[in-house]
Image: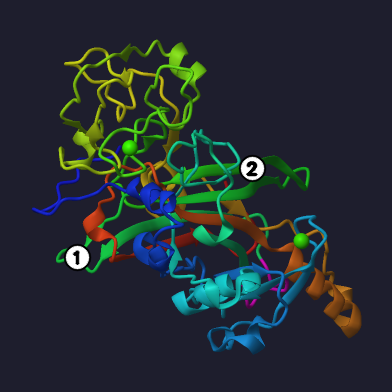
Amino acid sequence: MNRPHKIRGIWSLPLSSALLLLAFTGAVSGTLAWYAYSTRATLSMKGTTVGSETMLQIGLVSTDPSLKTKYASFASFDAPLDVGDNDGDGKKEYVYFTGTGRGLSSEAIGDYLRASHADLGSQYDPTKLSPVTSGAYSTGDVLSLKRSLIANENEYKEADPASYSVLRFAFRMSVKTDASEYLPNENIYLTGAKAILSGVDTEENYSPVRVYFSGKTHSYDTASSSVTNEKEERFLLSPSDKGESGDTVVAGLLDLNGDGYFDSTTRLDSAKAPREILYGMTEDEANRLGLTLTSRSEDSDVVNPHENLSGDSLVPSTFAAKHEAGVLSYAPSTTQEYDFSSTTGLALPKAHYLALSDVMPSVDKSGYLQGGTPLCTTGNLTTVITSSDAEDPSTLEEKKKAQAKEAIGYLDCTIYVEGWDPSIIDSRRDYSFNLGLQFQANGLPGGSHA
Ligand SMILES: [Ca+2]
Ligand SMILES: [Ca+2]
């Protein structure tokens, strides 16, 4: 749930004002960074050592084979592992594992992102995210990010890939003393996720950050020696909320052109009575909800349909504006307002997100992770190393190489700022946030467990 976000004394233009920036891109292109939030993605990783020699490795998947020579931040990484065309897009991928038990530095993540936006050259800044939106989203959906809306264009368009970050992780469990070097079929869990706004007097949770996870999980049935229950896990996570899943309403009235009135069709369509635009919805959808259009002879006072979420109210912003005289307005009457921020009542389009507690496992007395939702599973080893292989160094070498690839579990992760989150405020536009993620796995040398 989004919580009321009281901002000390300062108003406070909610994030959709991000939309405002883009509406004015032509005019204020010199200040494009104005709404870009810095991120230092300090992804940390902790490998559980059950038994003593099992360690979780984290790596990054890239199509660039030369990250180690290009970037000092990759110097301590293992040599790139050629995993072939891992995702079937016709291009080869390389996996860069950090040393066993080590996390990914924010520098390495920044360089990795730079490499994946090489086409943009120095124009791309990996520390900046610009607000985008998922549009309506339910757990299990494939994420497709849309760019911020433009005044009077009520249509979602594909987001610019430079406005969000995609990190493709690889995980592997290594067993240093075992004959087989890798632990197959182990679930990887998220055990920590936090987005903190920095640069304010007290560090606060930062609610508009969303992390989309997409990975494949499976179980391994020892009796039949086969992989079962193959599944694709896809969900949005809000790393800032303290334990509750929730919804972001991704439609409503906005003042994107900054004239103090909710945007309307006035200038676009003179044949039809001018009416307010319900961004994020078609007129048909609005009609189906039974929303009423009210005609006004006078301007209303400033209305903020997100007042209960943004914690501040009636200072004009993208979310807070007036209904204009002579324009049909979406309100039950001239004295009542629809609550466009509410996730109950009106069947508005919503983006559903989970909280850490929804996916995090618990730890039992013996230190096992139990329950929770695994994000991905390390690979099943189909290459078998037998005792006779030890006498044939070249075969052994080949088989170990094959296992090093088979043992990997993949997890794609998209980090973005949700433009419809009403708790982003203008006064924070120059701050940055830190995002931390922590992954863990069980690991018992000798096999998987339930
Ligand atoms: Ca590929
Ligand atoms: Ca307007």
Q: Amino acid at mark 1?
A: Val
Camera-side residue: 125 or 450? 125
In what element is the residue under mark 1? Answer: loop
Magenta segment, which residues? Answer: 175-182
In the rendered image, which quarter contains the N terminus?
top left
In what element is the residue under mark 2? Answer: strand
Camera-side residue: 306 or 77? 306
**What residue lies at 48% left-to-right and 61% top-to-bottom?**
439
Callout in the foreground (2, 1): 1
**In the rendered image, which residue does mark 1 sit on?**
200
Number of marks in picture: 2
Does 76 sit above or below residue 163? below
**Residue 22 falls inside the magenta stretch:** no
Would you identify the image quadrant in which residue 332 lies? top left
Give residue 219's position: percent from left, percent from top. 66, 45
**What residue lies at 88% left-to-right and 76% top-to-bottom?**
389
* Label placed on residue 232: 2
Camera-side residue: 81 or 106? 106
Q: Is residue 257 visible?
A: yes
Give residue 197's position: percent from left, percent from top. 27, 62
